[in-house]
Image (cartoon, rainbow, N blue to C red):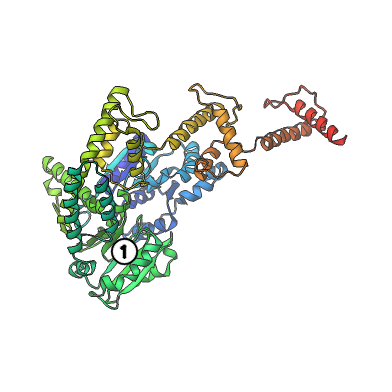
Amino acid sequence: NRTAYEKAVAMLASTGKAAVIHPTGTGKSFIGFKLCEDNPDKTVLWLSPSEYIFRTQLENWSDAGGEELSNIVFLTYAKLMQMDETEISEIHPSYIIYDEYHRAGAECWGQGIKRLREQYSEVPLLGLSATNIRYLDNQRDMAAELFEGNIASEMTLGESIVRGILNPPKYVLSVFSYENDLVKYEEKVKKAKSKAVRDEATVYLDALRRALENADGLDKIFDRHMTDRHGKYIVFTPNYESMQDYMNLAEDWFGKIDKDMHIYSVYSDDPSASRAFKDFKADTSDHLRLLYCIDALNEGVHVEDISGVILLRPTVSPIIYKQQIGRALSASRSCDPVIFDIVNNIENLYSIDTVKEEMRNALCYYRSHDGESLIINDTFEVIDRLAECRELFESLEGCLSASWNCMYAVAEKYFNENGSLEMPKGYRTEEGYSLWAWLQTQRRVRAGKANGILTDEQITKLDRLGMRWESAKDASWNRYFTAAKEYFEAHNDLRPSATYVDENGVRLGAWLTQLRTARKAGINSSFLTPEHIAELDSLGMVWDVYDFVFERNYHAAVEYYRRHGDLKCKSDYVDENGIRLGAWICNLRTQYQKRGR
């Protein structure tokens, strides 16, 4: 962290922006606190996803002997979003710190970040995060967006294990609730067009089913590998309902270890508000202690004396996966933790391979750059109870992907001939292949709206052909909204005439008119979503043109009255803002007189 701090300070001095990407559990918040400590006479604005994260980090800083820091102005990203320009202008920071800066890319927080940077564009900006990528947000690189690619220090989870910064875990891999997977693959096998493919895939599928059925139950796995039988373990669950279900299974799963286990749960966004969380931290009894939680301890929260974590997870982003592991690999632990990775679908059996690859890359780098002395760990124990299942799964996938490769070849041919994968709805090739339908299926599978599996390799291959992953509806929205943004940037408003067509042929005026009509009529469509409404609001969308014009002209009339003491302006009078006030007042008088008749 000291090395990273020195690099960050140097980069801030030269470029004004610096990002630090270090894994969860390595104490990267100390880099920000050190900046505050070294600049006691300067105000530092510290932004974070939650107040609890910040309080916990300050406690860790104090416990490590850090001085009290009185020069920090703390705000959550949500609070910043609610502040106007006047409130922001009163901060006067000398430095701005974005903690967990990948979260700053959230759509709901974007306007607050934008207003802040508009007022303090010259203030040095430091970012701290375990990742710079928003995996579930079109792979957005927040280091590039916020810091123009100025990364002062970057370390992977695998490298931190190699260097001994985080302890190597004992990693136990198993699966829970695989029945839905088998049903899904049965359907894929049935739909395979080739009888040879169906026959071969059926053999692998039957073998996979037998292997899963014969695998050890979770009660045996926990009993065998939970070596600290009176330790503290954090159990990560995806949502409240599943947490309740898993808590009801605690006696079945952990009863062999401790019949009188202590069970706690946290399901608030702010763990500090939970009495259970405080009790869990204070529990020093000689019993197994389990804290069930719903993503509440992913970011920035440190819990002492954790013996391990239990991941009961569906598909999640790599960010959350590594954050949850980081809770067990805390730098303050004196013993090696255990990680139980209990996945609920077969695809997730490969998550740990990413960490192992990071370790291999780090080992290769240090050994080829005279860095042997920095290598503390070159491996960690992986107990794979499903090795046979993984081999069978790979064989089954390989068998079924033959038809995928066939259709990909058709798509590649179309791309080479036409320069893109855009085609008429329902398009079939001369050979009879339903290419349009197949591409639609790939989009739906990736979006989780259709059964199937799309590997990273397959996604990459389609990306090479310029695959458009959004639906036609989303593509249409993006086209019109891009035109709206360009109009706003050019005119500083979003009030084109109803007949306005931009230089790209986008009928923006008609589109905005249709949206106003739909919303005014109370039409709830999948197109005019709350998110889309918020996006348009950010551009100053006028939903009721009549009310807007009346209010605008009324304020112009008030200003005229203040200056002249009356509203007796000529009918052709136009004020300094271009408002045809005379004609408007004349029209109002005419309408009033007609009503009087």
Pick the front one: 67 or 21: 21
Q: Where does residue 570 sit, x and y in percent of width and height?
A: 80, 23
Q: Where does residue 403 sit, x and y in percent of width and height?
A: 23, 39
In the rendered image, the residue lying farthest to the right is 597
Quarter holding residue 12: top left
Q: Residue at x 25, y 58 (%)?
A: 329
Count of numbered circles in the view: 1
Residue 471 lies, with reference to residue 214, above or below; the image says: above
Judging by the rendered image, the residue that carries numbered circle 1 is 235
In the rendered image, the residue lying farthest to the front is 195
Tell me, yes or no, if residue 359 can be seen here.
no
Tell me, yes or no, if residue 179 can be seen here.
yes
Q: Residue at x 72, y 26 (%)?
A: 580
Q: Where does residue 424 sit, x and y in percent of width and height?
A: 39, 29
Q: Quadrant of the C terminus?
A: top right
Pick the front one: 374 or 111: 111
Pick the front one: 57 or 208: 208
Pick the front one: 395 or 157: 395
As helix, strand or loop, the secondary structure at mark 1 comes to strand
Report the side of 364 relative to 229 (left or right): left
Residue 270 lies, with reference to residue 498, above or below; the image says: below
Of the residues shown, which amino acid type is indicated by label 1? Val
Residue 195 lies, with reference to residue 177, above or below; the image says: above
Residue count near mark 1 (Cα–Cα under 10 Å), binned few <14, some 14–19, many ≥20: many
Report the side of 64 relative to 534 (left or right): left
Q: Where does residue 559 sit, x and y in percent of width and height?
A: 74, 33
Report the side of 563 relative to 322 (left or right): right
